[in-house]
Amino acid sequence: MCGGFGHARISGLLRNHLNITLISFSKFTGFFDASSAELLAIKEACSLFSSSPWGKSFSLIVKCDCPLVVNWLLHPSRAPFVFKHLIYECLSVCENIKCVIHSIPRTANVSADLLAKKGMHRSQDSVYVYG
């Protein structure tokens, strides 16, 4: 997202333990605030992982650079009412897979941040599966 509220394009990378990208995605999601866009990106990543060949055998570690969103996912009762539906949608997708959510500094999320910046100007949605 650019700014706090506007046209949102979510993007993400699903990588293995060797930091090799397995899946990348970029998708226009509508008109949202930054926290909703972050939740939608996590939901999309969990959904892609759960339907992938890796979803049955491996755990997903979600690394999110928005500590507030991580806190809401770990403690849904603390989230503002307006976000609860998205939080419960994320948790519902994640309950079918082994999933752990971590907060990381934005500076540690360089690859995903670059992908997000590139994706902002795309006109089409994309999902790429590697290897």
Image (cartoon, rainbow, N blue to C red):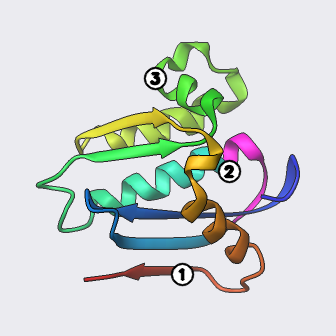
Q: Quadrant of residue 116?
A: bottom right
Residue at the limit of the structure toward the left, as seen here: 57
Hey, what amino acid is under mark 3?
Leu
Identify the element where label 1 is drawn: strand
Residue 70 in the image: state x and y as whole percent.
54, 30
Residue 126 is a magenta residue: no
Identify the element where label 2 is drawn: helix
Q: Are marks 1 and 2 in contact (CB under 8 Å)?
A: no
Residue at the limit of the structure toward the top, as seen here: 78
Hey, what amino acid is under mark 1?
Ser
Residue at 86% across, 46% down: 4
What residue range appears in magenta?
29-36
Q: Which residue matches tag 2?
A: 37
Q: Residue 92, relative to residue 126: is it above or below?
A: above
Q: Earlier in the sequence, mark 3 or mark 2?
A: 2
Q: Give the CA separation, mark 3 to mark 1.
A: 29 Å
Residue 11 in the image: state x and y as whole percent.
58, 65
> Which dot marks residue 126?
1
Q: Is residue 16 left or right of residue 30?
A: left
Q: Are marks 3 and 2 in contact (CB under 8 Å)?
A: no
Q: Give the CA separation, mark 3 to mark 2.
A: 17 Å
Q: Is residue 77 left or right of residue 57?
A: right
70 or 46: nearer the viewer: 70
Q: Which residue matches tag 3?
A: 74
Q: Earlier in the sequence, mark 3 or mark 1?
A: 3
Q: Earlier in the sequence, mark 1 or mark 2?
A: 2
Hey, what amino acid is under mark 2?
Ala
Q: Residue 87, relative to residue 56: is it above or below?
A: above
94 or 85: nearer the viewer: 94
Residue 71 in the image: state x and y as whole percent.
55, 23
